[in-house]
Amino acid sequence: LGTAALVDTGTAADQVPTNADVRNPRNRIVNPSMAISQENGFGTSVVPADTNFYIADEVDTRLTSGSGAVLQTSYQTLDGKRSTRITVTTAATDLTGIEQVGRYRIRLEKSNIHQLDNGDVVLAFKCRTNWSGKIPVALQNGDGTRTYVSDFDVVAGINQVFKVIPFEASTVGAEPNENGKALQVDLGYNNEDTYQQPAANNDAWQTGNFFCSDESTQWTKTINNYVEITNVDLYAGNVPREFQPNSYAQDLAECQRYYHKMAMPSAYASYGFVGAMQNTTSAQILGTFHPEMRATPILDNASGVGIATAAGAVSTLTTLNMVSQSKYAFRLTGSITPTIAAGTVIYLRALNVTTSFISFSARL
């Protein structure tokens, strides 16, 4: 299989300059190496229809049930780095209307891009495919009214995609303390109707909601095709550079701003959150978020969670709700069995399982 490096014209280039050749502006992508996957882990998964499925933290894919497609996600190693792969296990049969399959979608917070102006930005990523054709890339402002689409030639094998894009700060711009969605990046999107634009409109900002062109390869229409992506880089400038990964700790902290999953590695472990019994069947638990979350979160999910007392009494939480919260702290209430005396000090703990977890979401 061959290796190609793609430049902003969509044609092959011999090499990408090393990071020593350019200044080093900040990468705006959260979890750019896809090294963090709190919600769904690093196993193999079938993508559920009609929902955003996070293949890694802050990177989701989606397919509509009417497309007829079935996709499977898996985790690979690409040039020594973790990568995420989407494989077609049942080919798409209908991509008309709003039927869609196969994207990688990354959403960017306003405070993360507020320093970008009307100058150039670079979007770069490494991808591996087992087919040759054109892979679409789209940038869109936060309210979905302005879009920039480009197609890149890829060959079966490893491809380095690099694109210089004139940033449209007038429609994407944001302030440093704003936490809403400012920008969306879509890679590999498949649609043949509503979200497809004429290729003649590529490589310029357009009014509308588009993610691919009529020259983009509809790769999900062929069974066993796959796209695999890692090392996504978005930065101010117009010169290629070598991708520089973050530390695991930095990636995890940035991801926990949007989704925070607390998973206990052993049975009976304490979550470190305390509270008291409101009455004999209703518990109240208080806790804080570290780091603080992007916005007031929701209680996303919980499993294998109970409460315990200092005297050793243990009860199962049969219900759990978040009744008061901010991006800094939360208050949980829940029903328990068996009962515990009102006013008793309690703490949140794993039951006798090793799969106990509780998760909160403040995703864009």
Image (cartoon, rainbow, N blue to C red):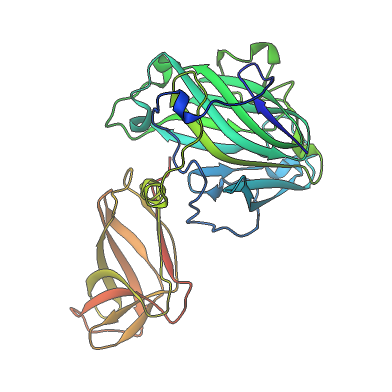
Q: Is residue 342 left or right of residue 150?
A: left
Which residue is the extreme one toward the left? 343
The one nearer the camera, 85 or 305, is: 85
- Residue 220: quadrant of the picture: top right
Residue 129 percent across, percent down from the top left = 72, 39
Q: Residue at x 33, y 59 (%)?
A: 322
User: Outermost residue toward the front?
Assistant: 20
Q: Position of residue 189 (x, y in %)?
A: 65, 33
- Up the image or down, 239 lies above or below 64; here it is above
Classify the position of the C terminus by image quarter.
top left
Please give the name of the residue rendered at 53% of the width and 36% of the height, measured from the top-left corner.
232
| Viewer-side residue, 157 vs 187 | 157
Taking depth in this image into account, of 122 and 210 the one nearest to the observer is 122
Residue 253 visible (yes or no) = yes
**For residue 322, above or below residue 237:** below
Q: Name the residue at 36% across, 30% down.
A: 110
Q: Is residue 142 visible?
A: no
Is 129 on the left or on the right of 354, as rendered? right
Q: Is residue 237 above or below residue 98?
A: above
**Location of residue 174 in the rendering, given as x and y in whole percent from the top left corner:** 34, 24
Residue 178, horizontal then vertical, whole percent: 30, 31
User: In the displayed structure, would residue 263 be above or below residue 330?
Assistant: below
Q: Nearer the viewer, residue 69 or 30?
A: 30
